[in-house]
C-alpha cells in the first residue's frame, strides 16, 4: 500500500474510463472517505449524490452546460464517460461549505487513486447547476432543502493514464520569517 505522500504524488486527472462499473464496496469506500473529511465546526453539512454514468439527468446537465457555453459538439461529456459520478452539495447558507466540499472531494480523489481507480474533479457544471434550471436540477439530484452544488468527481477504472501535473516550487511558494 502506498503512503499518502506517494498517492498524492502519483494522482492525476483521468479523462478516459473503462466501461467496468464500480462495485458497491468501491463506491462505499469512496463515500466514507468523503464523509471522513473534516468540516468547519464539525457541521457535517455535505451531501453526496451518487449516480451511474448513464443516469438520464447527466445527459440533461451536459446539454444545459453545452447550451450555456454555445457548444455544438463536444468529444466527451463533462465526466468523460466515467461509470460513477459523485456530486457534492452543501448548505447554501454556511460560509465554509465550499472549503468543506473541496476537502471532501480531495479525500475521495486520493482514496480513488490509492484503490487503483481514476478520477476527475469537476467544477465545469457550476454555472449549469446554479443557473436558470437550478431548482429543477437540485430536485432531480435529490439535494436536501437549501443545499446547492459545490463540486463533483468522476470515478472509474482507468482506460488512459497521464503523468501528474508539474509545478514551479520557487514561483509558487514563499517563506516568511
Image (cartoon, helix red, strand yellow):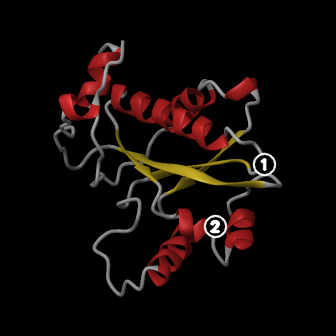
Cα separation, mark 1 vs mark 2, equals 14 Å
Q: Residue at x 36, y 87 (%)?
A: 72
Along the line of sight, which residue is nearer the eye, 63 or 8?
A: 8
In which quadrant will I find the N terminus? top left
Specify whether residue 3 is in view.
Answer: yes
Q: How many marks on residues?
A: 2
Query: Within 10 angstroms of label 2, few (less than 14), some, or many (20 or more) residues?
Result: some
First in sequence: mark 1 vs mark 2: 1
Image quadrant assignment for residue 96: top right
Query: Within 10 angstroms of label 1, few (less than 14), some, or many (20 or more) residues?
Result: few
Q: Residue at x 54, y 27 (%)?
A: 33
- Identify the element where label 2 is drawn: loop
Q: Where residue 172 appears, x then y in whole percent?
A: 27, 34
Horizontal side of 6 relative to 39 (left or right) equals left
Q: Where residue 4 appears, x then y in whole percent?
A: 36, 17
Residue at the far front: name it: 177
Q: Where residue 69 appears, x then y in whole percent?
A: 43, 79
In the rendered view, tell whether residue 37 sits above or below residue 66.
above
Q: Which residue is mark 1?
A: 93
Q: Residue at x 46, y 34 (%)?
A: 106
Mark 1 vs mark 2, foreground winner is 1
Specify whether residue 24 is in view.
Answer: no
Q: Where residue 113 appears, x then y in whole percent?
A: 34, 31
Along the line of sight, which residue is nearer the eye, 170 or 8?
A: 170
Along the line of sight, which residue is nearer the eye, 13 or 41?
A: 41
Contact between marks 1 and 2 (CB within 8 A): the answer is: no
Residue at the far right: name it: 145
- Identify the element where label 1 is drawn: loop
In which quadrant will I find the C terminus? top left
Horizontal side of 138 relative to 3 (left or right) equals right
The disc label shown at residue 130, or none: 2
Amino acid at each position: 500500500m502506498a503512503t499518502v505522500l506517494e498517492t498524492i504524488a502519483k494522482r492525476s486527472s483521468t479523462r478516459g474510463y473503462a466501461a467496468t462499473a464500480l462495485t458497491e464496496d468501491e463506491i462505499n469506500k469512496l463515500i466514507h472517505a468523503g464523509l471522513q473529511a473534516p468540516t468547519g465546526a464539525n457541521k457535517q453539512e455535505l451531501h453526496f449524490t451518487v449516480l451511474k454514468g448513464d443516469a438520464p439527468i447527466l445527459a440533461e446537465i451536459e446539454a444545459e452546460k453545452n447550451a450555456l457555453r454555445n457548444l455544438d459538439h463536444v468529444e466527451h461529456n463533462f465526466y468523460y464517460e466515467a461509470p460513477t459520478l459523485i456530486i457534492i452539495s452543501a448548505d447554501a447558507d454556511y460560509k465554509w461549505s465550499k472549503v468543506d466540499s473541496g476537502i471532501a472531494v480531495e479525500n475521495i480523489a486520493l482514496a480513488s487513486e490509492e484503490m487503483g481507480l481514476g478520477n476527475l474533479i469537476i467544477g465545469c457544471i457550476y454555472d449549469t447547476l446554479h443557473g436558470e434550471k437550478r431548482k429543477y436540477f437540485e430536485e432531480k439530484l435529490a439535494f436536501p432543502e437549501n443545499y446547492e452544488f459545490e463540486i463533483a468527481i468522476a470515478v472509474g477504472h482507468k482506460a488512459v493514464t497521464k503523468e501528474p501535473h508539474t509545478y514551479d516550487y520557487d514561483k509558487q511558494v514563499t517563506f516568511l520569517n
